[in-house]
Amino acid sequence: MKSTAAPTGAPVRVARTLLEGGPQTAAALAERLGLTTTAVRRHLDSLLDAGHVEATERAPYGPGAVSTSRGRGRPAKVFSLTAEGREAFEQSYDDLAVDALRYLAETGGADAVEGFARHRVAGLERRYASALQDSCASERPEVLVELLSRDGYAATVVENETGYAVQICQHHCPVGHVAAEFPALCEAETEAFSRLLGTHVTRLATLAHGDGVCTTLVPRQPASDVPNTTRATTEVSS
């Protein structure tokens, strides 16, 4: 049976790097951590045995979802955290949150859950809007990623191969288990991203649905240079 306990010792550094930076090869991990590739592979073996990490021949998302060549021979393995690996890290939700939303759904229906989801994201949106308002359109995805990472989402920006868009990748979700049962939380967050960035965004994948990462496609040239956060947060609060 696979272990659900959090990794300890040196392997936790490897796991944390995968959590924060997404899928990587052993060589890339070694470079980031300042360790030898041999040492990193030993820690990866421990994480693989525990079910916290999986190895594939391609990244599971984004423009990097192609085989990673290392010259002749087989392509280098790409390592990423499994759902069990993410669960092993401390989460900011508990069974009480799920029970509360179940009760809300039973007594108030889907509209009540959606209203709660919009109310929850409104506070985040107001905080982020103040930081984004002084940023130009092209800088907003990077600023949003920095803000999300501060809140525990381990977010990064990945350039789309077309050059006309970027992907905001969230490698961790503090409320992932709750969102798996109540997708309205993800939908409200996506709508907030659109308002904050001043352009329509598309959610391509979510951790809550079992994907390797939450991925949001953002056009490089937003439709508006000023996010309509004042109207959005007013609507959510009313």
Image: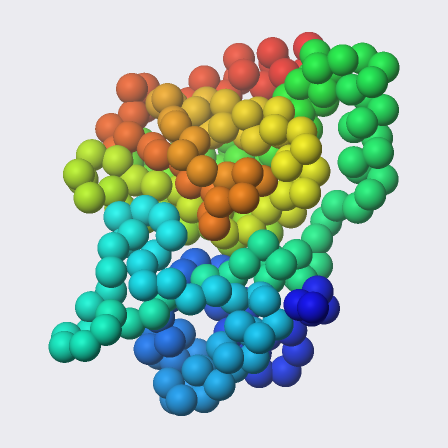
Q: Residue at x 29, y 52 (%)?
A: 65
Residue 98 relative to residue 14: left or right: right
Residue 148 appears at what percent x and percent y? 52, 45
Q: Residue at x 47, y 50 (%)?
A: 212
The relative height of residue 93 versus residue 51 in the rendered view (above or below) is above
Furthest residue in direction front, as rendered: 1
Q: Quadrant of residue 196?
A: top left
Residue 197 appears at what percent x and percent y? 40, 29
* Residue 143 appearing in the image: no
Instruction: Out of 3 and 169, give the one closest to the viewer.
Output: 3
Total numbered badges shown on the rendered structure = 0
The relative height of residue 155 versus residue 49 in the rendered view (above or below) is above
Q: Residue at x 57, y 31 (%)?
A: 186
Residue 42 appears at what percent x and percent y? 49, 85
* Residue 100 appearing in the image: yes
Instruction: Out of 159 and 45, give the one closest to the viewer.
Output: 45
The relative height of residue 36 versus residue 13 in the rendered view (above or below) is below
Q: Residue at x 80, y 37 (%)?
A: 97
Residue 198 relative to residue 12: left or right: left
Furthest residue in direction left, as rendered: 72
The quarter of the rendered structure image containing the C terminus is: top right
Colouring convention used in this rendered image of the protein: rainbow
Q: Quadrant of residue 142?
A: top left
Residue 33 appears at what percent x and percent y? 43, 79
The relative height of residue 3 versus residue 229 in the rendered view (above or below) is below
The quarter of the rendered structure image containing the N terminus is: bottom right
Instruction: Out of 67 and 170, give the one closest to the viewer.
Output: 67
Q: Quadrant of residue 137?
A: top left
